[in-house]
Image (spheres, grey):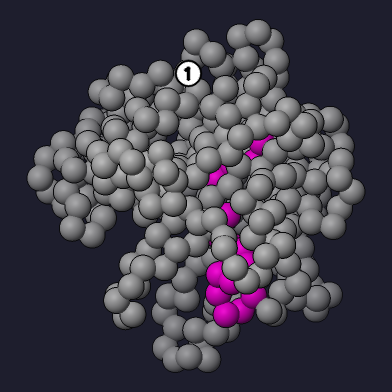
């Protein structure tokens, strides 16, 4: 089985309100890329992945006018993908949903959120991800109320042979300091937003521990947007969101494993895997970062899965196929990550 995570930049812009593809020469939202070119590139990438399940980060919007599932299923039908059935989690207000495309001949998947529904009062006990989490962020003896702008997507997956496992799709992201008027305000807002992201990671980690303690086979995948060297404020916090979610320092039975995260966390200087590439206009160069992960529970790690980052320059298989290499660059500022595992 091949499981993938893929953050598709501006995927929402490629569809009309009915979920039909806008295959035309208008701009897509990606710099100097038309909607038609991005759609064609995504078709090449998804076809090459040939995954049984793809966690789509920044999936098409789901609101009163648009719906994520028909948009993704239309895309899969046009591209002739095996992963042609879609399911979405809690909707959000960011035009960046978390959704799953999967092959219904191999899997049955359903949104299966855990935890209590809290309302505005919140709960300190890992409530449902569309609720409110109470936690003291700054150790001032006062509980803060934390919400997810993009609630993690909890899935119960069942293979046709009967094997069951859990998936949690996540997109943790520290908000940019919009509205800041000077460097001091930028710093204060950036630190505050990063602290909130860490609280979200703690919330997610508590759900992870519930599943691991229950012996559930678990896969946590998506864009955590945090890790060693990502910004200048990391020294103010003891751990990154990646370390929190993985359970660094915990007993092995309660930890998750991802080889790329493990390499990054144990090697502060030297070679590092990357899954995203952004152009920094002020510096006129590209910045690469490790943001996308597929983390697995110990029982799944023991099955010897094989991870792959579909990086157009770092992966020889992608580099040797010019059509795929160019499509990966055109399709998104992130590159897919896959895991092949015998289930």
Q: Does residue 124 sit above or below 178 in this rendering?
A: above
Residue 298 at x, y = what percent? Answer: 79, 36
Q: Is residue 65 visible?
A: no
Q: Secondary structure at mark 1?
A: loop
**Residue 304: quarter of image:** top right
Q: Which residue is rendered at x = 57% and y = 84% of the image?
A: 188
Give the farthest residue toward the top: 161
Look at 55% across and 84% down and name the residue there: 187
Where, by quadrant of the figure, is residue 220 drawn? top right
Q: Main secondary structure of the magenta part?
A: loop
The residue range painted magenta reads: 219-234
Front residue of 48 and 241: 48
Q: Is residue 251 left or right of residue 224?
A: right
Q: In the image, 184: left or right of 31?
A: right
- Which residue position is annotated with label 1? 103
- Residue 127 drawn at (x, y percent): 73, 46
Horizontal side, residue 286 vs residue 97: left or right:
left
The percent position of residue 70, horizontal first and vertical second, equals: 35, 26
Q: Is residue 79 above or below residue 334?
A: above
> Could you tell me which quadrant the C terminus lies in?
top right
């Amino acid at each position: 089985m091949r499981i993938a995570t893929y953050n598709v930049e501006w995927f929402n812009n490629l569809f009309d309100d009915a979920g039909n593809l806008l295959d035309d020469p208008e701009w897509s939202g990606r710099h100097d890329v038309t909607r038609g070119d991005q759609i064609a590139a995504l078709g090449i990438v998804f076809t090459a992945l040939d995954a049984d399940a793809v966690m789509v980060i920044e999936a098409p919007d789901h609101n009163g006018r648009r719906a994520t599932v028909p948009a993704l299923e239309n895309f899969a039908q046009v591209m002739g993908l095996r992963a042609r059935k879609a399911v979405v989690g809690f909707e959000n207000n960011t035009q960046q949903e978390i959704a799953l495309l999967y092959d219904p001949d191999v899997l049955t998947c359903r949104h299966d959120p855990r935890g209590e529904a809290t309302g505005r009062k919140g709960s300190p006990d890992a409530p449902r991800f569309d609720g409110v989490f109470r936690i003291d962020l700054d150790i001032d003896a006062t509980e803060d109320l934390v919400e997810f702008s993009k609630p993690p997507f909890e899935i119960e997956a069942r293979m046709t042979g009967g094997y069951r496992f859990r998936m949690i799709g996540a997109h943790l992201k520290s908000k940019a300091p919009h509205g800041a008027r000077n460097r001091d305000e930028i710093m204060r807002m950036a630190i505050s937003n990063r602290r909130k992201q860490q609280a979200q990671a703690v919330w997610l980690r508590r759900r992870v521990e519930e599943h691991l303690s229950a012996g559930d086979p678990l896969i946590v995948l998506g864009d955590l947007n945090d890790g060693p060297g990502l910004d200048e404020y990391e020294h103010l916090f003891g751990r990154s969101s990646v370390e929190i979610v993985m359970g660094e320092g915990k007993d092995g039975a309660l930890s998750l494993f991802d080889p790329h995260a493990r390499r990054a966390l144990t090697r502060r200087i030297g070679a590092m895997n990357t899954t995203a590439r952004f152009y920094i206009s002020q510096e006129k160069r590209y910045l690469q970062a490790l943001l996308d992960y597929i983390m697995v529970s110990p029982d799944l790690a023991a099955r010897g899965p094989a991870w792959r980052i579909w990086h157009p320059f770092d992966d020889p298989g992608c580099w040797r196929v010019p059509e795929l290499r160019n499509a990966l660059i055109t399709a998104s500022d992130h590159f897919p990550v896959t895991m092949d595992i015998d289930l």
